[in-house]
Image (cartoon, rainbow, N blue to C red):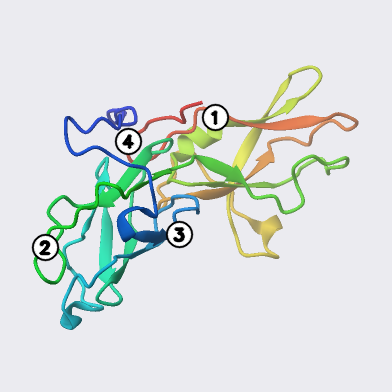
Amino acid sequence: EEPALAPEPATLDEAGKRPFTNNPKGDGLSVEGFEDTLRAGNTLTITFPTDMVPADRIDAEGVESPVEIWPPLNADFIWRSQSQGELIVRGPLTPGQSYRFRVSGDAKDLTGNLLQADAWGFEMTAPALRVIEEGYGERTSLNATPQIPIEFNYPIRLSDAAKGVWFQDRASRQKYPAEILLSVPEGEIDNAPIVEATAETEEVTAVRVRPLQPLPVGRRYDLVVDGVSDVHGGRALPY
């Protein structure tokens, strides 16, 4: 039985809560790392204009985060000084979803004063996938059975990848089915194991694809990725 589909990306209407201001350097606060792509494992360094915690909270685990995220996203916060901390994104992320970060409405500084931080906030979007270049992209020559590495920004359903990735003749639009191989250490590409669509594996975010049969020579091909869903909710890419 197929699991229920995950909901579409949440809208950024927070049902009448505080207004959101997209200003990463507002109200004396600053953030480093928000320019990067949003992925699980990202670390965002946030600096406050005043001391926020006593010295014994530095490097302590399990502390309450002074930063709220909408839609809710699993993340840890660790103080690295009395006025600076690291927000570590855990995920899972919803592909195509935009997330808003800002100071919690009840965050107080070390003297007990509420922060007036409505002028500070930033937004990040979780992207879907990228092809690891490794010399690919637009090429004038290609062997008949190329292996193309693809990295997704979320765990995928292998059954989707088995039917949602193919090579396509650019002129005739004829499709050539692909087989999915798990990524392997450099130098072991030829021995990469073929993945069965029903195989039980750990969460997979990176694979290699190879045409099921050698491609006819003298043609130009596109690699098409379409209809691959995230493993947690079964929601396909937004395009």
Disc 3 to disc 1, how far (Cα)?
36 Å
- Mark 1 = which residue? 163
Position in image of residue 29 (x %, y %)? 33, 60
- Pointer 4: residues within 10 angstroms few (<14), some, or many (20+)? some
The residue lying at 24 percent from left, 69 percent from top is 50
Q: Residue at x 17, y 68 (%)?
A: 63
Between the C-alphas of marks 4 and 3, the distance is 27 Å
Confirm or deny contact between disc 4 and disc 3 (CB under 8 A). no
- Read off the residue under disc 2: 113
Residue behind mark 3: 33
Q: Earlier in the sequence, mark 1 or mark 4?
A: 1
Q: Which mark is residue 118?
A: none
Q: In the rendered structure, are the residues bearing label 1 and label 4 in contact, judged by CB atoms less than 8 Å apart?
A: no
Say which label, 4 or 3, has the lower sequence index.
Answer: 3
Going from N to C along the chain, the mark reached first, 2 or 4, is 2
**In the rendered image of this protein, does residue 180 appear above or below residue 202?**
above
Disc 2 packing (10 Å; few <14; some 14–19; many ≥20): few
On screen, residue 189 versus residue 161, left or right, reads right
Q: Which residue appears farthest toward the right when viewing the image?
A: 218
Residue receiving disc 4: 233
Amino acid at dot 1: Lys
Query: For numbered disc 4, what is the local secondary structure?
Result: loop
Q: Is residue 88 visible?
A: yes
Q: Amino acid at mark 3?
A: Gly
Residue 21 in the image: above or below residue 106? above
Vertical side of 119 occupied by 198: above or below: above
- Looking at the image, which residue is at 55% across and 28% down? 226
